[in-house]
Amino acid sequence: MMKVLLKQTAAGLRVLIVLSVLLGVIYPLGVWAVSRIPGLQSNAEGSVITQNGQAVGSPLIGIDPVPADPAHDPWFHNRPSAVAVDSSKPLGPANPSSSGASNLSEYNQKLVDAINQRKGLIAQREGVTPAQVPADAVTSTGSGLDPSISVAYADLQIQRVAANSGVSVDKVRQLVDDNTSGAGIGIPGVNVLKLNLAVEAAAGHQLH
């Protein structure tokens, strides 16, 4: 009986050692090695975009830009976030250290009030009526960190961005088109970080 027990214990230990080496050492090292292949390294590191040697963000994570002067706002804005840094600012920015949705139903009065508040703020910011504000501009995503907005929401912001960045309306509209794709879910979306960087490059100076 003891010999059988020792034999089974030894077999179990051998399996444990083999699987530990295979899955705890070889497999992680293999994944890491593949991630170093040219063309894959950027994706493996989070697709971070750098300018002048400094990281300016990732096109995979949407963090709403905060203008230094809200009265002269040159930025395109992301969707609102349920994980905002400051709860007193219903339009964001998001808290990139966490991710999540509000988990409120469409009939929840708290959500209805938040949507109406956001709609009023965006309408005021863009100089339009609340009825002209698209749905994605006032609703957060499941992650709260959506990097893209709808073409309709981008179009709504073109006039303001052009006026405050010094870039012509036609040029800003072209930049919106250039940064619109159906990558990921197949629905046309505009990557906000890439679009803002393109506007700043077209302006020829740093936007604030």
Image (cartoon, rainbow, N blue to C red):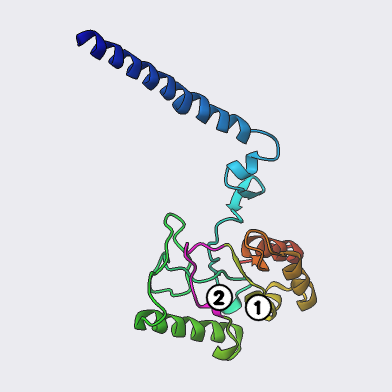
Q: Position of residue 135 (x, y in %)?
A: 55, 80
- Location of residue 110 with respect to 46 vertically, above or below: below
Q: Is residue 137 left or right of residue 173?
A: left
Report helix, strand or loop for mark 1: helix
Image point 37% across, 22% down: which residue? 16
Q: Is residue 85 left or right of residue 134?
A: left
- Alpha carbon of mark 2 to alpha carbon of mark 1: how far? 9 Å
Q: Position of residue 53 (x, y in %)?
A: 64, 45
User: As shown in the figure, which amino acid type bears the numbered disc 2?
Assistant: Asp
Q: Which mark is residue 179?
A: none
> Farthest top residue?
3
The front one of 42 and 18 is 18
> Farthest left residue?
1
Residue 45 shows in this picture: yes
Image point 39% across, 76% down: which residue? 105
User: As shown in the figure, which amino acid type bears the numbered disc 1?
Assistant: Ala
Q: Position of residue 47 (x, y in %)?
A: 62, 48
Report helix, strand or loop for mark 2: helix
The N terminus: image quadrant? top left
Q: Are marks 2 and 1 in contact (CB under 8 Å)?
A: yes
The part of the chain drawn in magenta is 135-146
**Prevailing secondary structure of the magenta residues:** loop
Taking the magenta stretch, the answer to whether it contains residue 82 is: no
- Location of residue 141 with respect to 112 vertically, above or below: above
Q: Is residue 110 left or right of residue 153?
A: left
Q: Quadrant of residue 107?
A: bottom left
Q: Which mark is residue 136?
A: 2
Residue 167 shows in this picture: no
* Residue annotated with mark 1: 152
